Amino acid sequence: MPQLPAQRSWQKRLHEIIYEADTPAGKYFDIGLIMTIVASVIVVMIDSVASINAEYGLLLLSLEWLFTVIFTIEYIFRLLCVKSPWLYARSFFGVVDLLAILPSFIGLFFPGTQYLLSVRILRLLRIFRVLKLANYLTEAQTLRQALRASSRKISVFLLAVFAMVVILGSIMYLIEGPEHGFTNIPISVYWAIVTLTTVGYGDIAPMTALGKIIASLIMIIGYGIIAVPTGIVTVELSQAQKKRQKVSTQACPNCSSEGHDTDAVYCKYCGHKL
Amino acid sequence: MPQLPAQRSWQKRLHEIIYEADTPAGKYFDIGLIMTIVASVIVVMIDSVASINAEYGLLLLSLEWLFTVIFTIEYIFRLLCVKSPWLYARSFFGVVDLLAILPSFIGLFFPGTQYLLSVRILRLLRIFRVLKLANYLTEAQTLRQALRASSRKISVFLLAVFAMVVILGSIMYLIEGPEHGFTNIPISVYWAIVTLTTVGYGDIAPMTALGKIIASLIMIIGYGIIAVPTGIVTVELSQAQKKRQKVSTQACPNCSSEGHDTDAVYCKYCGHKL
Amino acid sequence: MPQLPAQRSWQKRLHEIIYEADTPAGKYFDIGLIMTIVASVIVVMIDSVASINAEYGLLLLSLEWLFTVIFTIEYIFRLLCVKSPWLYARSFFGVVDLLAILPSFIGLFFPGTQYLLSVRILRLLRIFRVLKLANYLTEAQTLRQALRASSRKISVFLLAVFAMVVILGSIMYLIEGPEHGFTNIPISVYWAIVTLTTVGYGDIAPMTALGKIIASLIMIIGYGIIAVPTGIVTVELSQAQKKRQKVSTQACPNCSSEGHDTDAVYCKYCGHKL
Amino acid sequence: MPQLPAQRSWQKRLHEIIYEADTPAGKYFDIGLIMTIVASVIVVMIDSVASINAEYGLLLLSLEWLFTVIFTIEYIFRLLCVKSPWLYARSFFGVVDLLAILPSFIGLFFPGTQYLLSVRILRLLRIFRVLKLANYLTEAQTLRQALRASSRKISVFLLAVFAMVVILGSIMYLIEGPEHGFTNIPISVYWAIVTLTTVGYGDIAPMTALGKIIASLIMIIGYGIIAVPTGIVTVELSQAQKKRQKVSTQACPNCSSEGHDTDAVYCKYCGHKL
């Protein structure tokens, strides 16, 4: 089959445009796609506003279909140009891309606007593709690296916070009781989270003297312990950055090892002069 | 008595399972216990919701008794396998473990559901055992070390915050007065804490022009000084981390220089083998 | 033309006073100008208070005109003493300076107080000139440098926050629905921002159990991820500071080692004079 | 006068007890004084609670007089044992100490309880003496040093925040207007501070779509820029700590200079081997 190499060639080209961002065409595609996604997200968002929906409902519906068609074509192309379409289809973004177009088509066969409105929101998940922009920035890598390094420490912190919030919420339930809005323990724990994170809606607030004292305690704890995740991330970030900088582009002329301190005179691995 | 060594042996084995986490059995026990505790905490929490209690009250009560039996057996085993049961019984977790099972048994002899509901919440204290999970992570140690090192500096900070809050709360009481919700000084100090920690319930809010100016001042102070505990913890955490990494107490046998990386083989200043 | 050098001379002198701050006259001008700006800003602000406007309206109006005259003279002088007046007029502060005086004059010819009140607020933009004070402090430069260096990383962070807020807001719209105040997606996203940033007005609050669970999640996320911008700025600031202090680009003439303190006289590695 | 040396001797002894904390007697005096101050502050605070005042008014009044007598004796002793009593009387704490006892005595001659209640709050200022406790901790010095070093940078930051808040508050006044609670510019600026600092009372909240967009912007700015003071304090604190630690107790055997890096081999000032 002499056509195969040619076919492979346009597949390769398409793959370059859709999945990579090294070529100008790939960059334009990425930017165009992200703008389309943002536009489709805005359409879904303002379509939920009753007054706008009443006036521009038809326009928004046609825009909706326009985006559905664009995303469908994109989805088909994505399937076509990868080596294993099934692998893409099962990947996170593969599922999200499908979920972004499915509801509109289902709506054609099973009418029920109330239900569709909800499912259409799945399209919003595509907005995470915007984060692909972050890949253009090398800074994102340092950030991601620091967050991954600190994730375990932050888990320990969150574990302690959860234990604290359950205990303090339950104590407040005993003190304040249902007559002051602390109707049950889950609600009281919710209130403790609202207070500890310094959000403070004010829909539930302590009324008794003892309740206010404990609430003050929770606030001061919450105000103080925010230092912990901040400290963790700062230290990890500082280290991720240092690793980048302190790598001292110098390579040992003898053993080619890298990662020497900037003030090193001799290679720390083989003793050769740098 | 030839049975003694045998008895010691099963005690030893039980101790390994219950108190240690080096053996697979010990790990399974820990994980199983923590899952049981979390389940029992959830039961106490949702039991306090009136609508759930009305419908599933009987189921929750039997689950409650199931957990009581499990925890009682665990408590007896804990007493059996330690060398000095009295020492365990008086320890923090010993008291908590007892408090977790006592209310249910007392309830059998002295009925009074209203009162029992409250005491049953003591079971929630067992949730702190969940923090034992943190021991599996070496990260928790760095965290604890940093918090202990910064605790004295944070005390100084909290002392200053308390003095500030008492003064500013009293000033607001003078300015706003009882007619605007600042009914007495303790309430005004409570309001100052709510504002300084940026929680801001909104149940009490200044109404006079001067009161709003001082409230703005408190907010900006609170917004700014959160930097202090954050800075303290960050610095201590950064140092706790450095101590771990930079340990290498190795000194060069030739030039006695220190501060070598842990992976260094040769002195970076004179090239001598470390 | 013999008058040209003389004219240049007073222009130069005026330029020194108005644009520079090296001479005592230049400093007095800067301080005087900033005090006038602050005074004019206060006049615009308190003029908007109905009760004050009713009583002191005439006084405030005359003060308003006094400031207009002062600023007009200043504007003319600024135009006169720069080499290319057109360049100044089109610059940011040139436009702001014009906008600060224009409304008052337009009001003379096109009466319409309601409209003028609004436009007069443009005068407030002049307050940014106060930031010129910051130039007296070398610290401001370190700060600006750190913020510029971290701006790209913070953009990545904000991008992720926006994606998160849109998704979480939409989910809350589906869960809570219009009957609990989440009337449409934009409102729900607004609520998600209010919650994530820990502001927490309380004008909209979740009512369903599931809504409260997700709200708790948003709060804890918001409470935790504030660590990210804080970490970024801290690291950049720490580096901007280090660059300032550790500048000493001196290398040892004997062993070529670098990284000496700025006050070092001898190389700390080989003892040779720097 | 042979009595003078003797008199000087008890003055000296009293001075040691009252002003210093090196001797056991001095420490006991400090702790006793601080406990008395805290007790007197609590009496003033709970005396303002109407229900408590109604029941225990007489007890609180006698306690009040007891504290007044104690503080008066202390004030007299302080005056007696310093070399220049006038200098102490004019110092900050001298004035505070006088203000703490004066209101009670004035009340004897000019009755007027309403007025007295207010002035008695001046006694609360004595609580700042509690901060003297901080002197026992060397940590407080590092903290104070870091805060002083960062105060200028934080001033620049606050200047920018103030300019921002005035502009954004005025814009919100134009957008929302008096009909939505933004009755005048000062109120709007107050709202902008409440929002930017993430306090969020909710007594005033934007109602228009544009107002909500700008409010979201203010929240995100406020959420982000808290990183700035945090970063500043962290960096300064880290440096204050480093100065303490990195001072490398090593002194040059030749020139006795200190402050060498821990990895220095030769004195950086005279080149002598360390």
Image: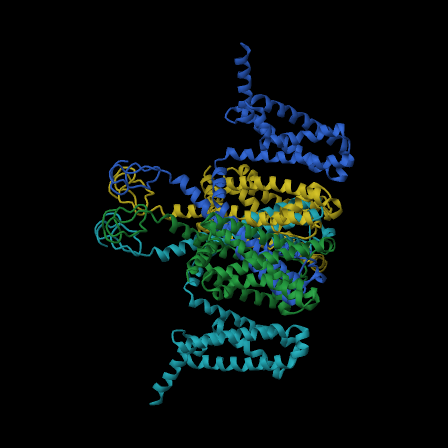
Chain colours: A green, B cyan, C blue, D yellow
Q: Is residue D142 visible?
A: no
Q: For the view shown, which residue lies furthest in the front direction?
A: A2
Residue C97 % position (x, y): 63, 30
Residue shown at the point (60%, 41%) measured from the top left: D164
Residue shown at the point (56%, 63%) measured from the top left: A98
Task: Give the left or right position of residue A200, taking residue A230 as reference.
Answer: right
Residue C162 % position (x, y): 57, 53
Above or below: residue A38 compared with residue C62: below
Above or below: residue C2 compared with residue A153: above
Residue B64 % position (x, y): 58, 79
Task: Give the left or right position of residue B264, taking residue B38 as reference.
Answer: left
Residue A155 % position (x, y): 49, 63
Residue A239 or residue B109, whichever sits in front = A239
Residue A170 or residue B192, whichever sits in front = A170
Residue B157 or residue A218, whichever sits in front = A218
Name the image quarter holding the N terminus of chain B.
bottom left
Q: For the view shown, which residue lies furthest in the top direction?
A: C2
Task: Give the left or right position of residue A273, taking residue C67 as reference.
Answer: left
Name the image quarter holding the C terminus of chain B.
bottom left
Q: Is residue C105 visible?
A: yes
Q: How many marks?
A: 0
